[in-house]
Image (cartoon, grey):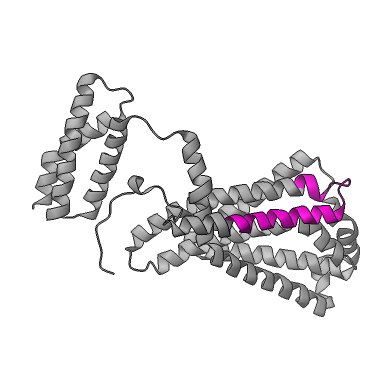
């Protein structure tokens, strides 16, 4: 088959089908034309697949037919069903597939944080690089705790959520580089380690963990998820496996949307806890910590129950199969 000649002869047909597919309410004549063109383009796609399976053209015609099929069918599934499917299948599956990456990022993060703290504790002369004795003492005995209670809960929650979302966005959006998520994770791990070393210097390490525990268990998990998502994309670019590299990145990139939206929920919950629970003087500390532990347990329960079940069903977090582009088979 001469693919260029084939495309030139049928280009007008394809463009007309695309135009009709965008019509919100086609007339009777247009609907008949849409159905006729759908059949013709489906025949074109079959010819391309059998005689000259060019991936770009196959993908273009597949997407065009999907849009035309949606226009012909008219009705879409109810929104509540799509939302339910996302929260029950897509999002848990995406987070489940990241579970080992998340745990690996967590282990390295905690190792770097602990090593930073031990480094400063073992070398007291380095503490002067963090500020004067008076400044460090004020931070440990006043500023660290005041941070959680000096602002109204609503504005503090909004600021915390925005900051955490920005950190997570840098990890995910810069994930393809592999460098950005590593930089963000190391920077945050060192910051946590430095804060712990200053609190330890003035005997406030217990207060440090007490203030961090209610929200930090879930908040840090959110940061680790973001780092895991970014690093997985980078790994896919380097090692796509049997799939073509661009196809692997497209599939994993779409699947990461489920993880990212799940991450939004995780950071939202941790932000609510930090804004309304951590600094609340009326709530006893055992209750605050129990809330944090319960939130973290809820996340991992969702991952290892709904996520595992969805993964066993073949879900990856990608869009539904009929909405994906068709791909040419490749040798493993």
Looking at this view, is 170 or 110 the one in front?
A: 110
58 on left or right of 275: left
59 on left or right of 112: left
Range covered by the magenta-colored residues: 275-302
Is the stretch drawn in magenta largely helix, strand or loop? helix
Q: Quadrant of the C terminus?
A: bottom left
299 on left or right of 75: right
Q: Give the residue at x 18% y 33%.
A: 37
Looking at this view, is 288 or 330 the one in front?
A: 288
Q: Give the residue at x 78% y 41%.
A: 153
Say above or below: 45 vs 95.
above
| Residue 312 shows in this picture | yes
Estimate the x, y position of residue 323 in percent, counting from the top left. Answer: 35, 45
Magenta-drawn stretch contains 285: yes
Q: Quadrant of residue 194?
A: bottom right
| Residue 215 shows in this picture | no
236 on left or right of 112: left
């Amino acid at each position: 088959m001469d693919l260029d000649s084939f495309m030139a002869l049928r280009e007008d047909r394809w463009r007309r089908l695309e135009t009709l597919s965008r019509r919100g309410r086609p007339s009777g004549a247009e609907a008949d034309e849409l159905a006729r063109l759908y059949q013709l383009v489906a025949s074109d796609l079959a010819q391309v697949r059998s005689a000259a399976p060019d991936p770009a053209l196959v993908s273009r015609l597949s997407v065009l037919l999907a849009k035309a099929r949606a226009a012909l069918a008219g009705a879409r599934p109810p929104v509540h069903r799509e939302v339910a499917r996302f929260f029950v299948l897509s999002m848990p599956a995406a987070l489940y597939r990241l579970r080992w990456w998340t745990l690996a990022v967590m282990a390295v993060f905690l190792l770097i944080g602990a090593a930073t703290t031990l480094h400063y504790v073992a070398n007291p002369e380095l503490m002067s690089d963090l500020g004067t004795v008076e400044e460090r003492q004020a931070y440990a005995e006043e500023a660290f705790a005041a941070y959680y209670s000096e602002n109204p809960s609503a504005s503090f929650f909004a600021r915390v959520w925005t900051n955490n979302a920005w950190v997570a966005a840098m990890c995910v959006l810069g994930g393809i580089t592999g460098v950005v998520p590593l930089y963000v994770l190391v920077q945050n791990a060192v910051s946590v380690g430095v804060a712990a070393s200053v609190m330890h210097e003035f005997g406030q390490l217990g207060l440090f963990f007490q203030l961090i525990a209610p929200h930090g268990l879930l908040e840090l998990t959110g940061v680790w998820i973001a780092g895991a998502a970014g690093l997985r994309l980078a790994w896919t670019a380097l090692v796509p496996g049997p799939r073509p590299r661009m196809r692997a990145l497209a599939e994993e990139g779409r699947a990461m949307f489920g993880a990212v939206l799940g991450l939004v929920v995780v950071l939202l919950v941790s932000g609510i806890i930090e804004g309304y629970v951590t600094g609340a003087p009326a709530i006893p500390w055992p209750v605050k910590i129990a809330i944090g532990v319960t939130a973290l347990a809820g996340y991992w329960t969702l991952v290892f129950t709904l996520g595992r079940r969805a993964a066993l069903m073949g879900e990856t977090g990608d869009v539904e199969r009929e909405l994906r582009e068709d791909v040419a088979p490749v040798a493993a």
